[in-house]
């Protein structure tokens, strides 16, 4: 398989998270920035990469990965020398998966419901909403980051990158409940990395 890494994105998208992850793994990659106003993400060429016409998308030789959390997890496993994920036999692997999937399946949909001010789900259907409520998601994250310094203790992982990037973005837009010493300290630690600064310098 070719080692060529290509990131398709737009500066105003979740591609910044994937770019940060690429900077963490330290492998050369090429960026293809798609202009949303010109609808370059809906061209037949790009739809062959991601039929949904969404970014980010990553190609690694013949491998195509879409969805931000999946890209982050894929890169952590594809380049184990970067030490961004516990080994499959490490007991911490379960917690690592937990927080990666929490970011994608719980926090992001709950956050978007909150930020977009969508109506609350009818009480009879609340059990069908897999992400629960925004307040529950925030409480779970607060409990997770409070012991510190990272989600798995002393080790920074790709799960911290994903959760930390989401919290950083949400706080910039004034999402409620994400201030205070626990979140302030966690986000400061997670983003105090050269790879984070390199990724944002390219935004």
Image (spheres, rainbow, N blue to C red):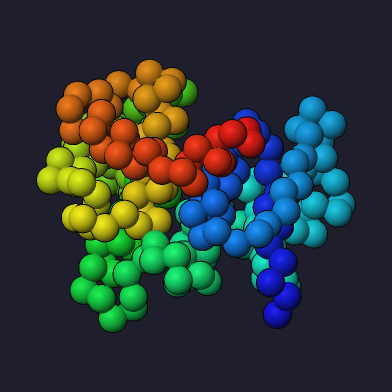
Residue in front for this viewpoint, 150 or 167: 150
Left or right: 169 as drawn, with respect to 92: right
Residue extending farthest to the front is 194
Q: Residue at x 67, y 67 (%)?
A: 60
Q: Is residue 25 above or below residue 139?
A: below
Instruction: State whether residue 52 appears in this view.
Output: no
Residue 140's spot in the image, x, y percent? Answer: 20, 42
Left or right: 85 as drawn, with respect to 195: left
Residue in front for this viewpoint, 47 or 183: 183
Q: Residue at x 75, y 58 (%)?
A: 49
Q: Is residue 198 above or below residue 153?
A: above
Quadrant holding the N terminus = bottom right
Q: Quadrant of residue 202?
A: top right
Residue 133's spot in the image, x, y percent? Answer: 28, 36
Q: Residue at x 51, y 60 (%)?
A: 25
Left or right: 183 as drawn, with respect to 102: left
Quadrant holding the C terminus = top right
């Amino acid at each position: 398989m070719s080692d060529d890494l290509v990131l398709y994105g737009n500066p105003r998208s979740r591609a910044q998270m994937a770019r940060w992850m690429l900077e963490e793994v330290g492998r050369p990659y090429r960026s293809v920035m798609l202009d949303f106003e010109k609808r370059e993400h809906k061209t037949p060429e790009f739809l062959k990469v991601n039929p949904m016409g969404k970014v980010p998308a990553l190609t690694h030789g013949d491998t195509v990965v879409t969805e931000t959390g999946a890209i982050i997890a894929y890169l952590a496993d594809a380049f184990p020398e970067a030490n961004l994920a516990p080994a499959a036999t490490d007991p911490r692997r379960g917690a690592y998966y937990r927080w990666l999937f929490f970011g994608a399946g719980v926090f992001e949909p709950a956050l978007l419901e909150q930020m977009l001010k969508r109506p609350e789900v009818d009480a009879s259907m609340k059990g069908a909403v897999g992400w629960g409520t925004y307040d529950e998601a925030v409480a779970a994250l607060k409990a997770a980051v409070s012991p510190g310094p990272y989600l798995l203790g002393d080790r920074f992982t790709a799960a911290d990158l994903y959760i930390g990037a989401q919290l950083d973005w949400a706080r910039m837009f004034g999402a409620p409940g994400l201030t205070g010493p626990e979140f302030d300290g966690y986000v400061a630690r997670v983003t105090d990395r050269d790879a984070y600064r390199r990724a944002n310098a390219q935004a």
